[in-house]
Amino acid sequence: MLRQNIASGELATAEDQLNTLQAQSPADPAADSLQRELAEAYLQRSQVSLQKGDVNAAATALARARALMPKAPALVGGVNGAITQARKAELEQAEAALKAAEAKPAAKVIDPAATSTPVALDTTHIRKMQAQLDDIATDVVNYNCDVVIQVPRKADAPWLEALLRKRVNKLNPALEWKLSHRVDRAQPAIVIVSPAKP
């Protein structure tokens, strides 16, 4: 039964059965052989988990193999080194992502952590509105944002879209972003800026 559980991957159950066997018959020579088989099964699970990129599962399985075979360090040495390397790679990846986030310039009008930021356009003062569109375009490029322009009159949409598209293209002509509009007669002109999800 214990060997069946090892073969079918029920290693925790097999370990419980082994503990029961060792408690009931401490001198049973079969227990040593079963203990080694179980340790090797845990080691194999550790290697498979590592190949799948699941470093935590690999480390857990390796710890179980070590506990079962404390006198066989060679058994676990290679996997241990691979887990250490994988953890180091994970850490380096996280550090690189953090550096990339820190390298981004400060947002001008959006909250980068928010799903979207509505910016009310000052359409009564053309210079202020142009400055707002400059800032919005900068954030669109720096934070890879999609934009919805909400206008009270349908006729305003193409004009505002053209002004914003021109600014974004000037900063980064290769940027892939979505620009759309909707009409809401009850609201003033608003630009809704949504940063890309990391």
Image: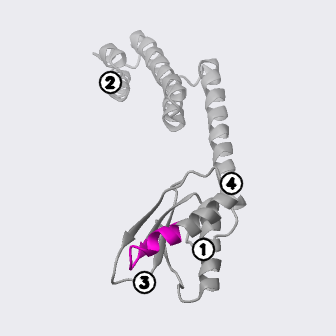
Front position among marks 2 and 4 = 4
Tell me the magenta residue range: 150-161
Determine which quarter of the picture holds residue 22.
top left
User: Percent position (x, y) of residue 122?
Assistant: 54, 85
Residue 85 visible in the current orientation: yes
Total labels: the figure holds: 4
Residue 77 vertical position relative to residue 132 in the rendered view, above or below: above
Instruction: Find out whether the residues at labels 2 and 3 contact each other: C-beta distance under 8 Å.
Output: no
Q: Residue at x 42, y 83 (%)?
A: 188
Residue toward you, 140 or 169? 169
Quick one: SS at disc 3?
loop
| CA–CA distance in space, label 3 to label 4 | 36 Å
In whole angstroms, how far apart are the C-alphas of marks 2 and 3?
72 Å
Taking the image as drawn, is residue 112 in sight? no
Membership of 106 in magenta stretch = no
Q: Amino acid at mark 1?
A: Leu
Label 2–label 4 contact, CB within 8 A: no
Q: Which residue is mark 2?
A: 17
Q: Which residue is mark 4?
A: 100
Whole-percent x, y for residue 165 in the image:
58, 62
Amino acid at circle 3: Pro
Q: Earlier in the sequence, mark 2 or mark 3?
A: 2
| Structural distance between the alpha carbons of marks 1 and 4 | 25 Å
Q: CA distance from mark 1 to mark 2?
A: 70 Å
**Mark sitting earlier along the chain (3/4):** 4
**Residue identified by numbered label 1:** 133
Quarter in which the N terminus is drawn: top left
